Amino acid sequence: MIGSAFPGNSDLTEIARNVRINIIRSVHHAKGGHLGGPFSAVELLVSLYFHELRIDPQNPSWEERDRFILSKGHSAIGLYAVMAERGFFPKEELMTFDAIDSRLQGHPDMTKTPGIDMSSGSLGQGLSAGIGIALGARMLGKDCRTYVMIGDGEAQEGQIWEAAFIASRYKLDNLVAILDNNKVQQFGWQYPMPLPPIDHPAQKFEAFGWNVIEINGHDFKEILDAFAAAKKVKGKPTIIIANTIKGKGISFAEGKYQWHARVPNDEELAQALVELEKAG
Amino acid sequence: MEKVLAQRDVFGETLVELAHQDPRIVCLDGDLSTSTRADLMFEAYPERFLQMGIAEQNMFGVAAGIATMGFIPFISTFAVFAAKRALDQIRIVIAQPGLNVKFIGAYSGILTGKTGKTHQAMEDLTVFRAMPNVVSIAPIDGVEVRAAMRAMVAYNGPVYLRLTRDPMPIIMAENYEFKIGKAIVLREGHDISLIGTGEQTQRCLEAAKLLAEEGVQAYVLHVPTLKPLDNEAIVKAASATGLVVTAEDHSILGGLGGAVAEVLGEEYPVRMKRVGVKDTFGESAPNGPLLEKYGLTPRHIVEAAHTLLNYRKS
């Protein structure tokens, strides 16, 4: 199937639930990987892969496709769970995550996984690659769009701001950045009081010449509306600042830096699965 | 009069030639094009010249992205910035995925036009030798720059091209065909082998002339590709004379000297000396005094040869 799957919002909710279950099962099985960041990004990733992106899971290197880069590459398992749901590879393959010879590496690897448009993992780099793709698409006269998801901790990298400047200077209106603004990084600032990874991201990107849309990153309607609004803006790149909750959906992990990359034990897995099954 | 050419001028002219033949070629500039001579590309094809400003990390990332769209980006920057300022970007989004990005290191080595230690690239070859998937080339002269650039475009993958700033004589014949990974014997001899890379091979040839005046016949091997390395040619050079001097305008740690020592240590141990920049940073000065102070002149190569020949006698 080519193009958007266009399921309704209730279906998207169901997909998101399955994705979260598959993420935590995969991380538990692999005894490695991250939880907090993938969980905050689930609704955003599901919206991209089941609604927004013009893609064909049967033909992942289709030249006219939209491109997506997960610049916050440590959330790879979240992306894999969504891509498996969308049909890029079998869901059973999620159990090979982080295993030897797996196509599903700890950080996205475009040479191994079908449908990955750029390798990532060392933070701060995806937005620049997205600019290259967007520039190339424009030079080729292609109408495909490029989406890059960055983390709020990642926005501490200087390269993000080099890229922010260049995307704006080249007026890349075919480029959309998504900031998974989950307010928590690996450890960050805890004393004398907790501080978020980045202050006033909207003001900062506005100052760099971007169109800024701020939304609740767990609300499908707001996400889809933001993608639609971004398409109407000409002459500047758009950033969607998606306010999210790290570890969203597991009561004991939500908002806690300790769950950035912690592997759940059997008991924690069981409790998380109960909560996820119950969630509306 | 002897013909001289600056490698950077040839780079700029050849980039335009190649861009004329191949619409996939674009140039990304880190605001050094008037030095690297990528400005010739701007004059010829302004719409295919993408100014990235003074922001190398982003520039290498943009190159990776545009390469996935089928373009062949040539990045114009100095060797110091390619090898260090954007090193992680090269590793993650260019070398690991093996993307078709060509990046030049202009103003390599110690002769950087009186800019001093901040701008002298002494360890770029060491860095890129240790980077999987990256081909590294250091041409001897302008003719080899042009030939190497043709080979770079024909090759699908990341390539680092190490260039020098100032005019130097032309050594290679106009019809010379460059092959990635192939070293070239420039002089036969049976007394001692001089192995050079980049422009420093020219100083090996001058050293060979000086040695010939004393009756010593030097075998001269030019190694333009540091990776993949032509192990066979290096072993052959060592076996031809049993003594090896390496010469490079680069640190002796991990560059050509290091590479040759690794090959010979495992495959054909012979006595050798490495002529190059010692474990030190440079300074700003005219070329002559720099070559003299940092031990890079033909005379320094001759002295290294004498040391080895004396070992043989004793």
Image (cartoon, coloured by chain):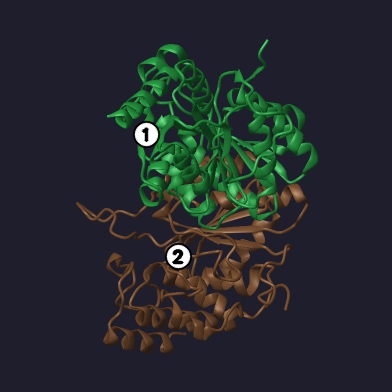
Query: Decide: marks 2, 1 in contact (CB < 8 A)?
Result: no
Residue A260 visible to an observer of this rendering = yes
Q: Residues within 10 Å of mark 1 (few under 14, many from 20)?
A: many
Splitting the image into 4 quarters, where does residue B202 fall?
top right
Residue in view at x 76 percent, y 50 percent: A140
- Chain under disc 2: A
Which chain is painted in green? B
The front one of A144 and B263 is B263
Residue in view at x 37 percent, y 83 percent: A29
Q: Amino acid under label 1?
A: Ile
Q: Residue furthest top?
A: B1
Position in image of residue A277 (x %, y %): 43, 89
* A178 to B183, vertically: above or below: below
The front one of B82 and B257 is B257
User: Taking A119 as reference, is A1 left or right?
Assistant: right
The front one of B122 and B234 is B234
Q: Residue furthest left?
A: A192
The front one of B306 and A73 is B306
Position in image of residue B107 (x %, y %): 52, 26
* A143 to B1, vertically: above or below: below
Residue in view at x 66 percent, y 51 percent: A134
- Chain under disc 1: B
* A166 to B312, vertically: above or below: below
Helix, strand or loop at mark 2 = loop
Q: Which mark is residue B252?
A: 1
Q: Which mark is residue A107?
A: 2
Count all numbered tags in the image, as a single digit.
2
Q: Colour of chain A?
A: brown
